[in-house]
Image: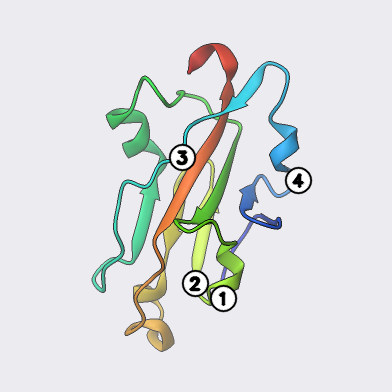
Amino acid sequence: MLFNGVLSQQGIFDPYTFTEASCTGDYKWSTWFDTNDPNLSQGDVEITSHIQKFFPNFMCSSPIAIEGQTSYDANPATTGDAFRISVKDGFLCLNQQINIYKNRICQDYKVRYCCPANSI
């Protein structure tokens, strides 16, 4: 399994030092976004720039953190999927790019972002 970020009981974060409780004060969590369904050709991707483009009233232009979970609220590290998470790119399940995972469909994932409270 490939990943970067920090594990929590439910989700995984980027930056790795972030936790659910870190998004406080002048910041708040966005709603959860699940914009793509997994398939065998591209896996499952939740891309930051696409979310910003299609949901401008619910997503900020400069998030400081991202959290990813499965659509059923499980930690991605428990799925056996190969994935990458970053604030800049979003959540990318990469099973279809790794030979030993090619025939394994990704779980369905969702993301949320820590944004300035006055921007969402």
Instruction: Tell me the crowding category of disc 2: few under 14, some 14 to 19, or many 20 or more residues within 10 angstroms, Cα based.
Output: many
Q: Is residue 16 above or below residue 102?
A: above
- Of label 1 and label 4, which has the lower sequence position? 1
Secondary structure under badge 4? loop
- Of label 2 and label 4, which has the lower sequence position? 4
Q: Position of residue 85 (x, y in %)?
A: 53, 53
At 36% across and 81% down in the image, what residue appears?
104
Amino acid type shown at disc 1: Met
Q: Is residue 73 left or right of residue 108?
A: right
Amino acid type shown at disc 2: Ala
For the N terminus, which image quadrant?
A: bottom right
- Of label 1 and label 3, which has the lower sequence position? 1
The residue nearer to you, when weighing 9 against 114, is 9
Secondary structure under badge 3? loop
- Of label 2 and label 1, which has the lower sequence position? 1
- Marks counted in the figure total 4
**Mark 1, residue position:** 1
State the separation of the CA atoms marked 2 and 4. 21 Å
Q: Residue furthest bottom?
A: 100
Secondary structure under badge 1? loop
In the rendering, which numbered label is found on residue 82?
2
In the rendering, which numbered label is found on residue 17?
4
- Of label 3 and label 2, which has the lower sequence position? 3
At 37% across and 19% down in the image, what residue appears?
57
State the separation of the CA atoms marked 3 and 2. 21 Å
Instruction: Tell me the crowding category of disc 3: few under 14, some 14 to 19, or many 20 or more residues within 10 angstroms, Cα based.
Output: some
Contact (Cβ within 8 Å) of mark 2 with mark 1: yes
Amino acid type shown at disc 3: Trp
